[in-house]
Every structure is written in C-alpha cells, then in structure tokens.
Image: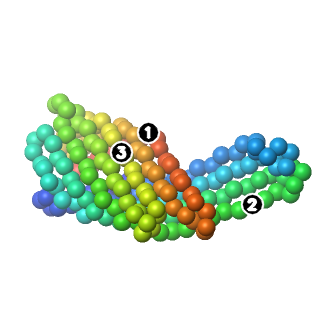
Amino acid sequence: MGAFEARNGRWGLIADLFYADLSQTRATPLGLLFSRGRIATEARALSGYAAYRVRDDERIAVDLTVGLRVNSVDLDVSLSPGMLAGQRFGVSETWVDPLIRARVRFVIADGWFATAFADIGGFGVGSDMTWQAFASLGYQFNARWSVQGGWRYVAIEKPIEGRDVAMDFSGPLLGFTVRF
C-alpha cells in the first residue's frame, strides 16, 4: 500500500495504491476425487480522490472526497489429481468504481494523533458494492515526519465472468509520512 496527497488550502488530491498477492493450498472437501486445492488471488487497486476540507483547526481536520478506484483482480483455482484428473480455472477482470469518502484526523495529545477514513462505492457501475475502512494511531515527530500503526479493511462484491465474487482484504499496517 502507498498513498500520496497534495493540498492547496481547503482542496486536495489524494492517490492510494493497494496490492495483494495471496494464495492458499489445502486438502479438498471432495474426498478422493481431488487430493488438494489451491486458490490464488492477486488484487490491485488505484484510487484517486478530490478532497475538500470542511473543518480544519488545531485539534481536528475533516475531509469529504469523491473519486474513482481502478480495480484489477485475478483469481485462480487448481485442483490436484485424485481419482479424477486435475482441474484448473480462473477469472480475471479490470473495472472502475465511483467512490465517496470521509476522513478525519484529530490530535489526541502532544505529538499523538488518530486518523480514520471510510469510503463506499461501486453502486452497480463497476462492482455491485465496494467499501473500505481504515483507522490508525500515529505520532508526529516534527512538522515533517510521522509514523502510524493501524488496520485496513477492503471489501468488494462483483460478478466476474458470470460468477459472483466477494473478496475481503484486511490486516495491520505500519506507515511513515514525510511532508514537503
């Protein structure tokens, strides 16, 4: 993951990149028909937002944004031979989702801050529904450098090549910010 933000007064542009390459192999629930199954998922998303700061004071900053997310997903399923010959199939697609988002950053104590954002999109234009939530706790070393630790959750529901696909990605994160 990575993010970039440029601001001019109350207006801002935000870019956000997400990439996941995950796979898992296990014994199949199909008994002797197939010995093992492997699922591999590769997901990429590039989001771009136009932001407007609706509140900005020494304790809290609130941004409302609109944007787009370009998604690309490759899903592959392999079944290893058992009594039946091995099988392999996959789906792949790239699409664009419209998004709306809100973000808040507030000062907790000297140097400490919290950030949270959530977006929702798709609305049947690209995916049926996509949303994400993010929350972090950070420490500002000086006007230029800060560090954050938190959690991000991304969900996507979309038919791909005639199959209903639901994907959820979540996990901890550690981030560094440099302002210039």
In the picture, measured across the screen, residue 100 lies left or right of residue 170, that is left
In the picture, measured across the screen, residue 65 lies left or right of residue 29, that is left
Structural distance between the alpha carbons of marks 2 and 1:
32 Å
At horizontal 33% and vertical 41% (from top left) the residue drawn is 135
Q: Helix, strand, or loop for circle 1?
A: strand
Q: Helix, strand, or loop for circle 2?
A: strand
Structural distance between the alpha carbons of marks 1 and 3:
10 Å
Q: Quadrant of the C terminus?
A: bottom left
Q: Name the residue under label 1.
A: 172
Q: Which amino acid does label 2 sit on?
A: Arg
Q: Name the residue under label 2.
A: 88
- Could you tell me residue 6's position as x and y percent? 23, 60
- The numbered dot on residue 134 is 3
Q: Which amino acid does label 3 sit on?
A: Phe
Asked if residue 144 can be seen in this view, the reply is yes
Cβ–Cβ under 8 Å for marks 1 and 3: no
Q: Compare residues 74 and 164 and report the one nearer the observer.
A: 164
Sort mark 2 into few (<14), some (14-19) or many (20+) by Cα contacts within 10 Å: few
